[in-house]
Structure formats: C-alpha cells, structure tokens
Image: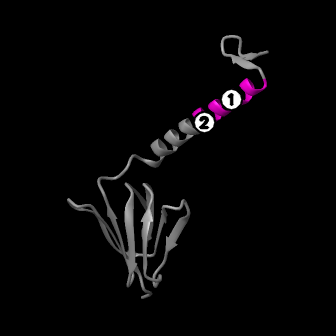
Amino acid sequence: MPDLLRLGILTPERTLLDVANVRRVSLKLADGGWLSIYPRHAPLLAETLAGPVKYTTATGTETISIAESVLQVMDNVVTLLTVGEPAAPETDITAAVADEEEKHFERLARALLASLGASFDEEADGLTM
C-alpha cells in the first residue's frame, strides 16, 4: 500500500475534520496560489486563506470550507489550525469578491469620465458631456 496522508482540521474548541488515507489535499495559500499536497511532501509551515480545502480519498474528492488557518505538513500528516468554524461557502465568498470588484470598476469608470469632462446619466442610461 502506498504512503497516504492524514488530514486534521482543528479549532481551539474542537476537531472539525480528522481523515486518514488521504491521497491529496489542495488549498489556497495566503499569497493567493494553490498548493497540492501529496504523500511524502516536504515539511512545510504556511498561512492559508479562508476558503475551500479539497481532499481526495479512495471514495472520491470532498470539500470543506474553513476560515484562515496555519498549515503544517510533517511526516505525511497535514494539519490546519484555524480560528473558528468553517467560512461561508465558496459561492458566497466569490459573490462578495465579484460585488466588490464591480464597485471598484464603477468608481474607476466614474473617475475616468470625470477626467474627460463627462458623466454617466443613470436615468437616461447614457453619457452626458
């Protein structure tokens, strides 16, 4: 039998997840990049973002959403120490990010129009000079 991982997700109050025989764990690091952890991964200590943690076992791939955490990988044991209960589902996080990006774009568009001496008339749904 090949080496497999053990995945544990812990809060100060309780254990959220403890799974053995994990083939792979994928999560998002604090720098925004995704990391996949396989058996025999080098020791690692890192910070993760809130969001989904995907793990694969013999029965398939599962996902759990968690808050920000500290990741430790050592001797085929992957441990996530998180500050609290699972975060909102990824779709909620994605919607919030998309809404914030839309507001940012709108502010930039209005600033550009103002610098050109124009404005957007929302009632007329068009530009005015």
- SS type, badge 2: helix
Q: Along the line of sight, which residue is nearer the eye, 111 or 80?
A: 111
Residue 105 is one of the magenta-drawn residues: yes
Residue 70 is one of the magenta-drawn residues: no
Q: Position of residue 59 (x, y in %)?
A: 42, 68
Q: Position of residue 126 (x, y in %)?
A: 75, 17
In the rendered view of the protein, which quadrant contains the N terminus? bottom left
> Nearer the N terminus, badge 1 or badge 2?
2
Could you tell me how far apart the alpha carbons at marks 1 and 2 are, in whole angstroms? 11 Å
Q: Main secondary structure of the magenta part?
A: helix
Colour scheme of the picture: one colour
Residue drawn at 63 percent across, 31 percent down: 107
Say which of marks 1 and 2 sits in front: 1
Q: Along the line of sight, which residue is nearer the eye, 110 or 45?
A: 110
Sort mark 2 into few (<14), some (14-19) or many (20+) by Cα contacts within 10 Å: few
Residue at the disc numbered 1: 111
